[in-house]
Amino acid sequence: MQVGGTEPDPEAENGIVNENGTLYYYVDGVKQDIGLFEYEGNYYYSRTGGALVKDCTYFISRTNGLLPAGTYTFDMRTV
């Protein structure tokens, strides 16, 4: 018996998802708005609202201790 939704939903979105040309990162069906993160050996940056920065150079401040704040180039050819 599942009480209070404690069991993960096996059909929930996970990973990087393309929604009408915009990429988002999901964990257990929840869109993440987390700044810099590492996923499958690559770095990504999610802006406010969760959209991933792609194919551009972007200043990042929310680094989550992964890299120093600064300007980085994000390329989504691997997604």
Image (spheres, grey):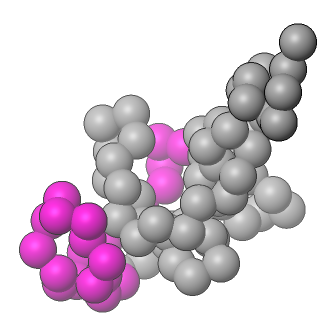
Provide residue 10's location: percent of width, then percent of height: 78, 21
Q: Nearer the viewer, residue 39 or 28?
A: 28
Residue shown at 17%/64% (left/top)?
65
Q: Is residue 4 magenta?
A: no
Q: Which residues are magenta?
A: 58-79
- Residue 38 at least partly seen: yes
- Image: 56 above or below 9: below
Provide residue 37's location: percent of width, then percent of height: 36, 55
- Image: 50 above or below 11: below
Provide residue 71's location: percent of width, then percent of height: 22, 83
Q: Residue furthest left?
A: 68
Q: How many marks?
A: 0
Q: Is residue 70 magenta?
A: yes
Q: Say left or right for 48 vs 68.
A: right
- Image: 3 above or below 27: above
Residue shown at 64%/48% (left/top)?
26
- Residue 55 at least partly seen: no
Quadrant including the C terminus: top right
Q: Nearer the viewer, residue 32 or 59?
A: 32
Q: Say left or right for 68 vs 11.
A: left
Q: Residue furthest top?
A: 1
Residue shown at 65%/78% (left/top)?
49
Residue shown at 84%/27% (left/top)?
3
- Image: 6 above or below 74: above
For the stretch drawn in magenta, the main secondary structure is loop
Q: Nearer the viewer, residue 2 or 40?
A: 2
Quadrant including the N terminus: top right
Provide residue 77's location: percent of width, then percent of height: 48, 49
